[in-house]
Image: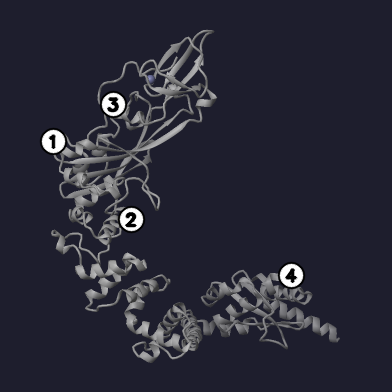
Amino acid sequence: MWKDADKPDQSQTLLIDIPDVAASNITEQKKKDLLGLPNITEKEIRQMNTFFQPYIFYHKISKNETECFCTACNRSFIVNTTLYHKTPEICLHCRTTATAIAAGFSQKDKTETINFVLFKKHKTKDIVYAICLNAGKRYNGDYRNWYNRLRICGKDFLRQPDLECDVLKIYVFKPGECRVYRRQYSYHDNKIKWIYTIVKKKIPQAFSATMYKPADKIILNKELLFKTHLKYYAKALPLALSDRLVEWLNLCSLYPIAEIAAKSKSTTIQRIVQDRLCYDISYLDIVNWKAKKPKDFLKISLNELKEFEQRSNKAYSLKTLEVFARHKKKGEKLSFDLCQYECNLMNYDYNYKEIMKIIDIKMLWNYKKRQQKNGTWKGERTYLDYLDHAQKCGYDLAQSNILYPRDIQQAHDDAVANWQIVRAEAEKKEAEREALKYGYPERYKKLCKKYAFEYGDLTIVVPKLASEIIDEGRILQHCVGGYASRHIQGKTTILFLRHKNEPEKPYYTIEIDEGERRLIQCHGFKNEWENKKAEEVKAFEKEFAKFIKSPKKYKAERKDEECRKSA
Ligand SMILES: [Zn+2]
């Protein structure tokens, strides 16, 4: 038999577990905010259920009888007629017109989720809550024995109708205040524990929105707002923002000036409010959100705003106005064309703030004009790249002939070349410092003495500097360059294997373990991927391995051998 909702539970249904709020380790502030949260009622759940696509699942129980189950009211009934798959059918209980679906296979791929914002009011205080939840219905399991998620919160009851509710965020509105909590669960000791964290963004979106539009949602209990401190804000919701009610209430609670600003005839001011609401962009250089009076809201004059709007047909962004306001604050009045030019500079990925400290946008603009006239301008990127390198090389950019060089391409190429030299020298110095720190000069002398070894046409060369190891790796295209520092620090030992007549030219590279007196690796160009290891190297390796194992013994054996040969 289907599990019916014939005897609905009239008591208040708990969806958010208040004891969980009390028990969770949260600050006093959070407790004050969340402990008064009213429960979601049976009635509200039923209301949410009506927004879902209704189905009547059916199956034959005898020759004449078909048992039906309505998902709109969660009740079953028996009919004597034949039902047809995917045709409309009327529920005998709730009179809902629903789509008939043959129970079993076809019912199982039916799922639906809907975002709801549920407004609730504190029992006595003037506090409003906006509970943002994601409700879902699934029929892929045996929905008649629906797994009751709420059991894990320590409650055990049948939910009617079957709705899976996942509370994501809770907005807490008090007069002049709004805090937003995110509700997440953590799994600990086989128990689910709910945690409430304050959302850092001042105006977060109720549900994750796309770039262009907010997530679809259904708002319930909106009418109760008109009995609370939010009534004026709710009434003043601008038409363009009608699908962002929660965010709007949030904005107005924090900054009441927004309500007046949104009514402005100026499209610029409207855009500022919309951007604050939709993307949480503050434009602090243009406006003062904490202003009490409209005349204090803008940081620019009405005439300037008018001029900006007249020029807006040139598609200036609000960023242009921001740049204008920033310069105005410093006492400079710039044309909007120049502000727009500065905005364009921001789009290059150089450190904008640092660069603006050095250059004067007016001078740069004139410089560009002059260069263009002479046909020597190479574009903003070349210029910014020049500045970047000039700064790193320590050029005196306070001198205008250095800040604005006569030939930008030449100056750019010189600065890049100089920077490479400066960097190489800095690296060399750093390597020398490291070598001294680890006492490498002494170790170098010892290594030279210890590994003075030749065999055939080949000889051992001890690296004198870390840079030699890096060069060796680069020329032979293997990974020894990465060993340079470890060699200098004495953590490993790198030796070069070279031809006696070409001791400067990298050939093979050896790593040895001095402690265990063994050869770890010996590699040549690209680790011999393209060629096999040369025979002379193999022979050398064999002898050298014997040598490092016991130099005295090896030398004695070789002496004997030579004696025998000469005898
Ligand atoms: Zn029904």
Q: Nearer the viewer, mark 3 or mark 2?
A: 2
- Where is residue 280 shown, x and y percent of the image? 30, 56
Residue type highlighted by circle 3: Glu
Residue found 32% across the figure and 49% down from its top: 205
- Whole-angstrom CA distance, mark 3 to mark 1, is 21 Å
345 lies left or right of 428: left
Residue type highlighted by circle 1: Thr
Quadrant assignment for ligand 1: top left
Dot label at residue 124: 1
91 lies left or right of 13: right
Location of mark 4 (residue) = 530
Location of mark 3 (residue) = 42
- Whole-angstrom CA distance, mark 4 to mark 1, is 83 Å
Give the position of the N terminus as an image quadrant.
top left
- Whole-angstrom CA distance, mark 3 to mark 2, is 35 Å
Residue found 24% across the figure and 60% down from its top: 266
Label 3 crowd bin: few (<14), some (14–19), many (20+), radius 10 Å: many
Q: Is residue 13 above or below residue 275?
A: above
Residue type highlighted by circle 2: Tyr
Location of mark 2 (residue) = 279
Label 2 crowd bin: few (<14), some (14–19), many (20+), radius 10 Å: few
- Whole-angstrom CA distance, mark 2 to mark 1, is 34 Å
- Of the image marks 3 and 2, the number of the one nearer the N terminus: 3
Q: Nearer the viewer, mark 4 or mark 2?
A: 2
Do tag 2 and tag 1 residues touch (Cβ < 8 Å)? no
What secondary structure is found at the residue carrying circle 3? helix
- Of the image marks 4 and 2, the number of the one nearer the N terminus: 2
Residue found 36% across the figure and 71% down from its top: 343
Give the position of the C terminus as an image quadrant.
bottom right
Label 4 crowd bin: few (<14), some (14–19), many (20+), radius 10 Å: few
